[in-house]
């Protein structure tokens, strides 16, 4: 009823191959109309009452004079001792993680937590600074410098990386990072999990010519303009990324045909609409205060992804014995699809960080 879907629509979705539990959330650009209610140990009596009222209001016919059951009332419960573990308070569910590193605690106590970097004014691209390989974050351990080793931009979600030595920063992360994505004929985002050949699609950004050039083996290069084409001629559609709905617009038949030929089945290229940005739904795992309304591109959960080369080297040692052929460190790094690759002295020390600075930019981990 809410989505104005008829029984005939549901039958057509079924004939199109949609079944409960699959990854088809949209058919012909429209939601398929699933409702999920999580109900379990943490549910309260009030939750049960609301659910019951919902069932009565939406399922039972109004013409029924008699309801086949009566609403129950909250039963009397025995008092709980004060020392019994209680989950009624929200703060009991999300304890603040204490960082064991003394040096990090002393730094955090002296400085104000800045939150993830945001521009002061929402201008067109909100470029305030640039990240470069020469930038050096604050050193923590043994005075050894921690440097930025590589910077990768992923213009099209799940496609190949575009390596740069410096790059502008916008209000959603690296400029143009994950602004586009490939969707199937039902408008559902395609990733390398379903379509491994996406890794062979190589996009690159030409800031001077204001175009994105897309290349793939056996295909002529094709370009897409960087200007946001959200005018009247743009086809606005609704897509989903990690269960979050995003407003997008179609990039046209030319690039859709190019991708369909290369991937071997119908698909289209869509871009996030500039007037509707995805918001971050992640809670800060270190218990720090997050900046509100963090604007995201088509990433899953954060504006920037960072990995440490030392951590990757340790991982490589663990998995080398299982591999028939050795895996190059550069290939392993690329599999993590990070934006910023750093070179620190110790593996996994980044897991203890609460905030870092690269040049004039400050980031909350």
Image (cartoon, rainbow, N blue to C red):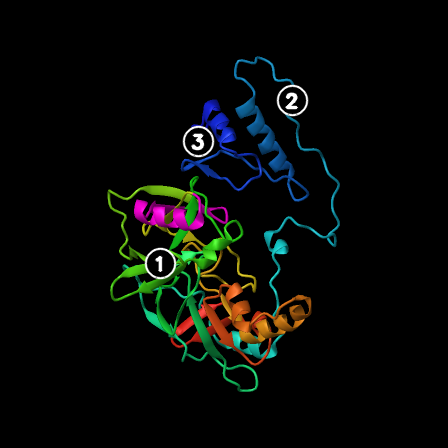
Q: Residue at x 25, y 66 (%)?
A: 208
> Element at badge 1?
strand
Q: Residue at x 57, y 79 (%)?
A: 103
Q: Is residue 45 left or right of residue 225?
A: right
Residue 120 lies, in percent from the top left, at 33, 64
> Element at badge 3?
loop
Q: Nearer the viewer, residue 39 or 131?
A: 131
Q: Quadrant of residue 363?
A: bottom left
In the rendered image, the residue lying farthest to the bottom is: 143
260 within the magenta span: yes
- What residue did someone put label 1 on? 214
Residue 211 lies, in percent from the top left, at 28, 60
Q: Are marks 2 and 1 in contact (CB under 8 Å)?
A: no
In the rendered image, the residue lying farthest to the front is: 218
Q: Is residue 107 left or right of residue 224?
A: right
Q: Which mark is residue 70?
A: 2
Q: Is residue 350 left or right of residue 5?
A: right
Q: Nearer the viewer, residue 301 or 327?
A: 327
Q: Which mark is residue 335?
A: none
Is residue 70 visible to the viewer in this orientation of the structure? yes
For label 3, count other residues whose C-alpha is less than 10 Å away and answer few (under 14), some (14-19) or many (20+). Answer: few
Range of residues picked out in magenta: 240-265
Q: Quadrant of residue 20?
A: top right
34 within the magenta span: no
3D distance between C-alphas at marks 2 and 1: 63 Å
Q: Residue at x 35, y 70 (%)?
A: 167
Select label 2 or label 3 by which is in front.
3
Select label 1 or label 3 by which is in front.
1
Which of pointers 1 and 3 lies earlier in the amino acid sequence?
A: 3
- What residue did someone put label 3 on? 3
């Amino acid at each position: 009823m809410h989505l104005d879907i008829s029984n005939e629509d549901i039958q057509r979705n079924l004939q199109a191959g949609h079944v409960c539990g699959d990854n088809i959330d949209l058919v012909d650009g429209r939601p398929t109309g699933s409702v999920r209610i999580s109900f379990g140990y943490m549910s309260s009596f009030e939750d049960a009452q609301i659910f019951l009222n919902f069932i009565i209001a939406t399922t039972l016919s109004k013409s029924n004079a008699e309801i086949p059951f009566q609403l129950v009332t909250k039963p009397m419960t025995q008092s709980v001792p004060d020392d019994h573990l209680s989950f009624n308070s929200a703060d009991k569910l999300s304890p603040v993680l204490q960082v064991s590193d003394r040096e990090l605690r002393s730094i955090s106590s002296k400085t104000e937590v800045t939150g993830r970097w945001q521009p002061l004014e929402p201008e067109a691209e909100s470029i305030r600074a640039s990240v470069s390989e020469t930038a050096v974050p604050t050193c923590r351990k043994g005075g050894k410098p921690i440097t930025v080793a590589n910077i990768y931009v992923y213009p099209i979600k799940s496609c190949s990386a575009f390596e740069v030595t410096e790059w502008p920063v916008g209000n959603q992360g690296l400029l143009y990072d994950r602004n586009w994505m490939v969707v199937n004929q039902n408008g559902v985002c395609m990733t390398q999990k379903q379509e491994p050949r996406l890794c062979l699609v190589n996009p690159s950004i030409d800031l001077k010519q204001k175009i994105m050039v897309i290349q793939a083996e056996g295909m002529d290069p094709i370009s897409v303009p960087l200007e946001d084409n959200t005018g009247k001629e743009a086809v606005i559609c609704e897509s989903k990324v990690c269960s979050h709905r995003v407003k997008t617009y179609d990039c046209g038949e030319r690039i859709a045909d190019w991708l369909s030929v290369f991937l071997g089945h119908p698909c289209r290229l869509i871009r996030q609409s500039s007037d509707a940005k995805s918001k971050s739904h992640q809670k800060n795992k270190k218990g720090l205060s997050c900046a509100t309304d963090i604007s995201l591109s088509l990433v899953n959960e954060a504006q920037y992804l960072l990995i440490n080369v030392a951590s990757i080297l340790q991982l490589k040692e663990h998995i080398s014995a299982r591999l028939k052929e050795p895996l190059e460190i550069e290939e392993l790094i690329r599999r993590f699809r990070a934006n910023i690759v750093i070179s620190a002295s110790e593996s996994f020390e980044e897991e203890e960080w609460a905030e870092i600075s690269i040049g004039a930019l400050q980031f909350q981990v």
